[in-house]
Amino acid sequence: MWLVANPKPKSVTVMGAGVTGVASAWYLSQAGFEVTVIDRQSLPAMETSFANGGQISVCHATPWANPATPKKALAWLAKPDAPLLYRLNANAEQWRFIWRFLRECTAKRADDNLKQMVNLGLYSRATFKALMDELPMNFEQRLQGIMHFYTSPDEYQAAVAPTQRMQTLGCHRTLITPATARTIEPALSVLGDALVGATHTDADFSANAHLFTNELAKHCQEHGVRFVYDTHIDRIGFDGTHITHLELSKNNHSFTHTSEHYVVCLASFGKRLLDPLGVHLPIFPAKGYSATYAVRDGKRVPQVSLIDDEYKLVMSRFSSEKRDVLRVAGTAEFNGYNTQLDQTRCQAITHRVQTLFGDALDYDEPNYWTGLRPMTPSNVPLIGRAYLGKIWHGQTATPNRKFDNLWLNTGHGTLGLTHSCGSAKALSLLMAGQTPPIDFAFIGA
Ligand SMILES: Cc1cc2nc3c(=O)[nH]c(=O)nc-3n(C[C@H](O)[C@H](O)[C@H](O)COP(=O)(O)OP(=O)(O)OC[C@H]3O[C@@H](n4cnc5c(N)ncnc54)[C@H](O)[C@@H]3O)c2cc1C
């Protein structure tokens, strides 16, 4: 009788313990890989995944690069509290990014990118919900949908065609009257006649990204995933198109780490580690802000996750036995890698929130935060096998240029929480030699 031994599981190192890294670790371990996660922080989700807007927003998410953006961005250039701000400086990386971003602003490119985002988003939301059914986790999730509300008649009219386009792509997003909007979310009554309309999706939802990532990391650990914290990845060692090792440092002590495969989930910081290998990621950081306010009068604070179109802010209520808060997030600043708080932008958020909800919130200690969204010019993340040259989704590479053991799951920009579970599951399928069941332009496919 022949005995066939189980093949030894393949080892994989996930670089980065943000929401995309931890979700990758989960699905890779479920696919039978032996997983190690390395991060410079001492806990998961301490950088961009720390205090984001918390929306799992498939049906309201349009690419930032679209035909209307260049004109709006020019008008915003002179306003320090504008929702989108380019701080023009001599950074060549930033100019390259702007050039590629502008090329994505045509109607055709924007529609192609939208399709990619929605396809991945629908798959990701279903994967996320299946995970919530499978694992006991509490991360302040609210399954009350997402509503996008408008106070400008022109902007509301301009939302009709994109909403219909979303519907053709499989999104259940509907145009609703102000009266219906107020019935779904009574806190919007405060707007009176200023509310001109809204769009609503009941299948989208909201969740605390930091809590979700930490809860999932605990489940990963229970399933054998090893987490190595407080450890900086200094360099990726390579030989042609093969990764040989990682050079790491912890407390001024340097050492190396090896595995069979490596996955990059380093948000805006992967680019600088990969450039020396000849793998050029089109990622640039877009700084965003959030403010978190304690709730004083719960009845006047939204339960449904909202998007305030005029101010480009998202609002999500996070409640648990320990706390009840409203997180308000938004704005984008292209200003390199700096994460300093700009008081003008913080005050602009608080001013808008005060106008809407008055003394229903506590403004004494708003918890302000900034994070660097890892933006690609198209808003479409980079998932798949790395290759030598300029990385672009859907691009094929000849076998001699493809890395045999380097994988990407990065560049999630505005939608890292939304796309986390789908991107991670799709990557685990690709790495296991299978085809993910979605129409999406994977890297190096
Ligand atoms: C204001 C704001 C609001 C947002 N709102 C939403 C929203 O409502 N919905 C949504 O879907 N998305 C939202 N996003 C986007 C989302 O937060 C990001 O896309 C997501 O967090 C990216 O996750 P990540 O795991 O790729 O990056 P990160 O969470 O930043 O993880 C990367 C990890 O890599 C580690 N790292 C980096 N370099 C090194 C190194 N050299 N060595 C070791 N470790 C390293 C970091 O410590 C970090 O833990 C928002 C973002 C911002 C800024």
Image (cartoon, rainbow, N blue to C red):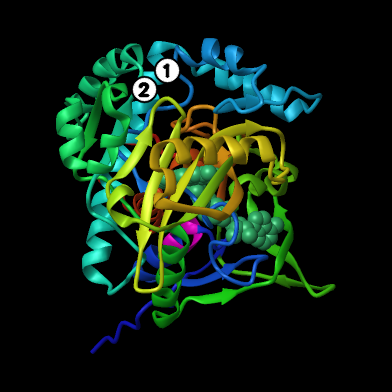
Q: Quadrant of the C terminus?
A: top left
Indicate the secondary structure of the residue bearing disc 1.
Answer: helix
| x 54%, y 28%: residue | 83
> What label sits on residue 281 in the rendered view?
none
**Is residue 5 rendered magenta in the image?**
no
Gap in angstroms between the C-alphas marked 2 and 1: 5 Å
Q: Is residue 40 above or below residue 175?
A: below
| Residue position for label 2 | 112
Quarter of the view holding residue 197: top left
Relative side of 184 to 363, left or right: left
| Residue position for label 1 | 109
Which residue is most to the front? 359
Locate residue 163, reporting x and y percent: 24, 23
Which is more toward the observer, 24 or 131? 131
Which residue is most to the bottom? 1
Within 10 Å of disc 2 (Cα), the crowding (few <14, some 14-19, many 20+) is some
Q: Quadrant of the N terminus?
A: bottom left
Within 10 Å of disc 1 (Cα), the crowding (few <14, some 14-19, many 20+) is some
Assign the magenta stretch its main secondary structure.
helix
Relative side of 195 to 288, left or right: left
Could you tell me the amino acid type at mark 2? Asp
Give the extent of the magenta segment.
19-23
Which is more toward the observer, 287 or 308? 308
Q: How many marks?
A: 2
Q: Are marks 2 and 1 in contact (CB under 8 Å)?
A: yes
Quarter of the view holding residue 320: bottom left
Q: Is residue 116 above or below residue 30?
A: above
Relative side of 288 to 216, left or right: right
Locate residue 22, reporting x and y percent: 47, 63
Which is more toward the observer, 386 or 146? 146
